[in-house]
Amino acid sequence: MRTSFFRFFLAAVVTAGSLEATARASDFFQYGADPLKPYNRSVLEMRTPYGTFGRPDAHFEKWRLNHHGLRGPDLGPKQPGEIRVVAMGASDTFGLHEPEGQEWPAQLNRLVQAEYGRSVHVINGAFYGLKLPGTTAYLKERILPLQPDIVILYVSLLHRAFFTGDNAKGAGRLDRTEGPESGAKIAGFEWRMARKIKEKFKEILPAGWLYRWNVEHFRKKIERIRSRGQVQVTSVVDERLFQETAGDLEEFIWFAQERGIRVILTSHLNNTTDEWGLLNFQFLLPAFEPDTIRQILDRMNQVTAQKAREHGLAFVDVAARVKPGAPRMADHVHLTGEGAQLVAQALMPELKTVVETLGPEKP
């Protein structure tokens, strides 16, 4: 009996070791990753006094950062007559589920350059996990050195809910960072094979089965959070959430305008049309039922539109122009390549109007 157990254990160790070695070899040949060093999304991150920024020249799988720590090609000194448009936001702007080069800032850049040539550039200045209260500091420390002429702010205002009053207690994960998926860590060791196996399962499993599994998995997680008494379910939303959202936007607009930067605000596209999207939002804010979450999201977009009117800013109602849900969205907020294309197309007319005020030369 003991011999059989030892043989089984040894076979399991050899199998796991072989799979892990294969995963590391795959990362080396496909991405140039060092087999002996950690290789996960943390290699993209750089901790600063102002928050987590992208690490210059870092790369993880399809996500490659330039020497400014941003997605996209390296940027040289700004040229005379060049107009720089910077897209700011979190993971839904940075790009997660889209094929490489299909995130909406990249698609918008192609639309703009088809119109104006290389005299106008759209730069992806986003980084996953960026929260609304940190956007002004991020603009100051990371975006200003790029000498932007226009900034498009597309950030999920629900992120402000994680930092507001009693609604935040247990309702939002303050340390939850949306970003590329990393491998599992067991006893401090990173098992890259876990990520590879998960990716393969996603490829081979029927989409309907995977959808139902995700739905049931998230529903049970929300039930566990509620059953432990970590949150009290309520339909009452702290009004400070919207007041502080308005304050965050006010600070961002003032800082940008004081430096001669034109600001374009947008509403945020949120998928509350299907069960999977709603459960993602409920996992973030388990204190609220779906109707209350929809009200919060709608009110947040109204706050943004109001700020745009108060300051005479361009405002693009992305939420009204792009239909939420599959196949345009991968989950509650993140886009597919198709969804990113529609967002870029929705932004283009208003961006063109603002660009024209700067007098770019057309090819």
Image (cartoon, helix red, strand yellow):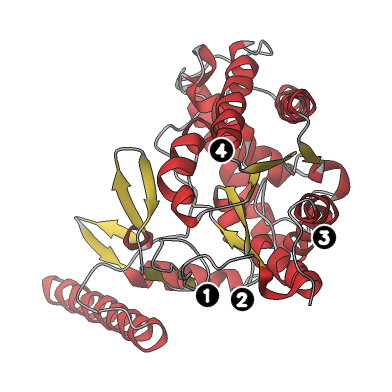
Q: Amino acid at mark 1?
A: Lys
Ranked by sequence position, the earlier of labels 1 and 4 is 1
- Quadrant hosting residue 266: top right
Label pair 2/4, CB-CB below 8 angstroms: no
State how far apart marks 1 and 4 are (Cα).
24 Å
Ranked by sequence position, the earlier of labels 3 and 1 is 1
- Quadrant hosting residue 203: bottom right
Which type of secondary structure does the marked residue at label 3 adopt?
helix
Q: Would you name the residue on which mark 3 appears?
A: 345
Q: Amino acid at mark 2?
A: Ile
Q: Nearer the viewer, mark 3 or mark 4?
A: 3
Judging depth in this view, the residue of 217 and 162 nearest the camera is 162
Q: Would you name the residue on which mark 1 appears?
A: 200
Q: Amino acid at mark 4?
A: Lys
> In screen coordinates, is 221 left or right of 98?
left
Q: Amino acid at mark 3?
A: Gln
Q: Would you name the residue on which mark 4 appears?
A: 220
Ranked by sequence position, the earlier of labels 3 and 2 is 2
Q: Would you name the residue on which mark 2 appears?
A: 204
Q: Which mark is residue 148?
A: none
State how far apart marks 3 and 4 are (Cα).
38 Å
Which type of secondary structure does the marked residue at label 4 adopt?
helix
State how far apart marks 2 and 4 are (Cα).
24 Å
20 lies above or below 303:
below
Judging depth in this view, the residue of 72 and 144 nearest the camera is 144
> In screen coordinates, is 90 left or right of 266?
left
Judging depth in this view, the residue of 65 and 150 nearest the camera is 150
